[in-house]
Amino acid sequence: MNEHAGDRLVGGYLRPRHGGRSTRRRLPIAALVLLTARLLLPEYRAGGTGRVDLLSVALSLGASLPLVYAIKHGFDTQTTVTLVASAVFTVVFVRRQRRLSDPMLDVALFTDRASGTALGVLLVGLVGVGGALY
C-alpha cells in the first residue's frame, strides 16, 4: 500500500474517533519546525541564475495543459485538436530551449542515458501513484 492511500485510511479511521485531537497534537510540532527551520537549515542560493523567460513558461504551459485536457476528456475531435496543439507547442518549446544560453529546462539532459532512464522510471512511478489515487 502506498503511503498516500495509507494516510487516507488512517485519517478516515482516526477522525470520527478522535475528532480534532490528533490534529491539535501535531500543530505545536509543526509550529516548532517552522520557527526553527530558518536557524537550523542552511540557506542556498544558486549563483548566476538568469531571468525568468516568460515566453518559455507560456510555451511549456501550452505544451502541457492541452495534453492534460486530452487525457482527462477522452478522445474526440476537440481532443485531437488539443493534442496537435500540445505537440506543436512542445516542438517550439524544445527548439527554443536548445537555442537559449540559459534555458528553463536543459533538454540535453534527456540525451544522457542515465538521466533519461532515471526520468523515465520517475515518470512511470508517478503515473502509477497518480493512477492509484484516482
Image: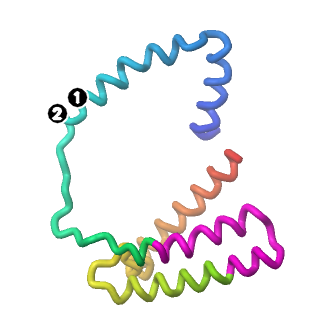
Q: Residue at x 71, y 47 (%)?
A: 134
Q: Secondary structure at mark 1?
A: helix
**Is 65 within the magenta?**
yes
Residue 59 percent across, percent down from the top left? 49, 77
The tag on residue 39 is: 2
Q: Which mark is residue 93?
A: none
Q: Residue at x 44, y 78 (%)?
A: 110
Q: Between residue 26 and residue 113, name the one nearer to us.
A: 26
Q: Position of residue 23 (x, y in %)?
A: 50, 18
Magenta-drawn segment: 58-83
Q: Are marks 1 and 2 in contact (CB under 8 Å)?
A: yes
Q: CA distance from mark 1 to mark 2?
A: 5 Å
Residue 122 picture location, percent across and down: 52, 60
Residue under label 1: 36
Figure quadrant of the N terminus: top right
Q: Quadrant of residue 48?
A: bottom left
Mark 2 neighbour class, 10 Å CA radius: few under 14, some 14 to 19, many 20 or more:
few
Q: Residues within 10 Å of mark 1 (few under 14, many from 20)?
A: few
Q: Identify the residue at image location x=63%, y=17%.
A: 15
Q: Secondary structure at mark 2?
A: helix
- Give the amino acid at mark 2: Leu
Which amino acid does the dot numbered 1 rest on? Thr
Closer to the camera in the image, 54 or 8: 54
Residue 121 position within the rendered picture, expressed as x and y whole percent measured from the top left: 54, 63
